[in-house]
Image (tube, rainbow, N blue to C red):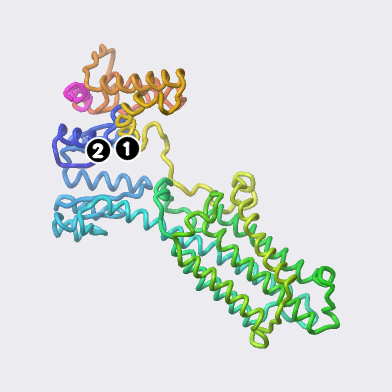
């Protein structure tokens, strides 16, 4: 939180909102002290900075530019004229449509017409939904393209008359399913709140992720194998005489086309999932577009095969051929499930050119916990203690919960006490970070040393004398 209010007001508001978490390494700093920090000190403080009080427009702009130079995607909200530089420097600037000034609106990228912060959450949710819709469609389209081109190319080479197994009008229908119907079906999935549980993607992350390539290649291999087995083994399976009978050859080509089309129809369900979810049918009842397009595709395929005749160069198939085509198409569902459950780590070596680091995760969860974590633990303190018997918690678990909550509450209470100042044995450059009391520093250093990532005193940046002098006053004053 960056504000022009004084330290006490900013700290109180940030604590109530769950932004300031002093027990987890959070720092409160004032603008005049922030301006005096050296680049080395900023590297250490800004990742832990949670509240910047008494800040000037230049302080806000400096903070935004520092974050952007460190590959962070920065969003700034503001309503005043002094927020203009920061709004302009951010990746995305949000201004208030009702209370905001004209300067802020001009400098921002998005104007919240209702001045409601929930609109920002909805914007992020829909942004991720649109991004997922594009990826779903690409996953489906690339699978169809790779398979159709490979089958048409190989079949035309092998055939004595150099004729592809798919005719031009059949490929037109397949492309209609691929480009039009699938785009509408996969792009109309409504957003759900679990999309916000994911880490944000990096700016340089690929549009087609490793998991998508895994599904595309796996489904393409399945479709090519099934279609080639149908094309070159149907004489033995169904006792056809394609060499001597023109009708049997038409039946065979219709069977391959029908099987291929059904695999695309059922693969649409697999493409609704981009990650490792098991159920690809989840929430399908909320997307009536998908259900309607699925029924249209099925009805259109039946009409083309049974009554397409000369126009589509097909012939009516009997029940056994229809059963073979539908079962072949249904194979896409279990194969898709296996591909989703297959860990990416097992086959990373197959696609070394695809980046596997897609999501931007915090470098250290201990220093950057979700803001709501502290708030939820404090809010549920009474509930956890009062409902242990109803929840079926054992005696050992109940004691553990009480002990952990008591320790957590004790740590919070110590934040407002003045810690005894240690005797000086040298330069003040051995001091700790501003905004953290001596007790907090000891706890944090011990914790980081136990995790193997602690910093020695010699490695810590030298803090300005006035910043270190105010650290204990700030901790004791609140």
| Quarter of the image with the C terminus in it | top left
Instruction: Say whether residue 430 is visible.
Output: no
Q: Residues within 10 Å of mark 1 (few under 14, many from 20)?
A: some
Q: Which residue position is annotated with label 2?
A: 17
Q: Whole-percent x and y of residue 135?
A: 49, 60
- Judged by its main secondary structure, the magenta piece is helix
Which structural element holds mark 2?
helix
Q: Residue at x 15, y 35 (%)?
A: 9
Image spot of residue 280 (x, y percent): 54, 55
Question: Label 1: which residue?
Answer: 371
How far across and down, in percent of the image, does residue 198 sit?
43, 47
Please name the residue shown 34% across and 19% down the image. Answer: 407
State the SS at label 1. Answer: helix
Residue 343 magenta: no
Residue 269 falls in image quadrant:
bottom right
Circles 2 and 1: CB atoms closer than 8 Å: yes
Q: CA distance from mark 2 to mark 1?
A: 8 Å
Q: Is residue 470 above or below residue 104?
A: above
**Crowd tier of the residue under label 2, counting other residues whose Cα lies within 10 Å: few below 14, some 14–19, many 20 or above:** few
- Can you tell which mark lies on residue 361? none
Rendered residue at 28%/47% (across/down):
64
Earlier residue among tags 2 and 1: 2
Between residues 53 and 137, which one lies in front from this camera angle?
137
- Is residue 472 on the magenta stretch? yes
- The answer to whether 77 appears left or right of 187 in the picture is left
Q: Quadrant of the image for the N terminus? A: top left
**Residue situated furthest front in the rendering:** 390
Query: Magenta stretch?
Result: 467-478
């Amino acid at each position: 939180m960056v504000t022009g209010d004084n330290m006490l007001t900013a700290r109180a508001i940030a604590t109530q909102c769950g932004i300031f978490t002093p027990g987890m390494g959070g720092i409160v700093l004032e603008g005049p002290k922030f301006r005096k920090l050296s680049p080395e000190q900023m590297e250490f403080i800004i990742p832990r900075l949670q509240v910047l009080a008494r800040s000037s427009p230049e302080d806000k702009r400096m903070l935004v530019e520092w974050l952007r130079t460190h590959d962070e995607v920065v969003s700034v909200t503001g309503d005043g004229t002094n927020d203009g530089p920061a709004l302009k420097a951010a990746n995305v600037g949000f201004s208030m449509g009702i209370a905001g000034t004209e300067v802020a609106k001009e400098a921002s990228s998005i104007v919240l017409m209702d001045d409601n912060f929930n609109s920002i959450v909805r914007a992020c949710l829909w942004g991720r939904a649109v991004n997922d819709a594009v990826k779903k469609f690409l996953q489906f389209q690339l699978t169809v393209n790779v398979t159709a081109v490979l089958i048409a190319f190989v079949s035309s080479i092998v055939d004595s008359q150099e004729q592809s197994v798919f005719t031009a009008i059949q490929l037109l229908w397949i492309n209609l399913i691929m480009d039009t119907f699938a785009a509408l079906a996969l792009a109309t999935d409504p957003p759900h709140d679990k999309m916000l549980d994911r880490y944000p993607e990096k700016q340089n992350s690929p549009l087609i992720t490793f998991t998508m390539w895994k599904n595309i290649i796996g489904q393409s291999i399945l479709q090519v194998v099934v279609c080639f087995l149908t094309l070159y083994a149907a004489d033995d399976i169904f006792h056809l005489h394609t060499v001597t009978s023109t009708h049997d050859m038409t039946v065979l080509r219709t069977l391959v086309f029908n099987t291929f089309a059904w695999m695309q129809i059922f693969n649409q369900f697999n493409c609704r999932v981009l990650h490792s979810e098991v159920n690809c049918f989840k929430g399908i009842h909320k997307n009536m577009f998908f259900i309607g397009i699925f029924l249209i595709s099925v009805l259109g395929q039946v009409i083309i095969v049974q009554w397409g005749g000369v126009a589509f160069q097909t012939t009516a198939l009997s029940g056994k051929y229809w059963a073979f085509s539908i079962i072949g198409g249904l194979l896409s569902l279990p194969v898709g499930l296996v591909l989703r459950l297959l860990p990416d780590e097992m086959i990373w070596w197959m696609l070394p050119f695809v980046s596997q680091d897609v999501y931007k995760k915090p470098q250290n969860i201990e220093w950057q916990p979700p803001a709501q974590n502290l708030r939820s633990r404090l809010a549920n303190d009474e509930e956890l203690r009062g409902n242990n018997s109803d929840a079926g918690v054992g005696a050992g678990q109940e004691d553990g919960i009480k002990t952990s909550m008591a320790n957590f509450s004790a740590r919070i209470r110590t934040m407002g006490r003045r810690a005894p100042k240690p005797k000086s044995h040298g330069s003040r450059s051995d001091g700790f970070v501003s905004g953290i009391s001596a007790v907090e520093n000891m706890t944090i250093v011990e914790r980081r040393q136990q995790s193997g990532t602690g910093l020695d005193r010699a490695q810590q940046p030298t803090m300005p004398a006035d910043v270190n002098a105010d650290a204990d006053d700030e901790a004791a004053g609140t």
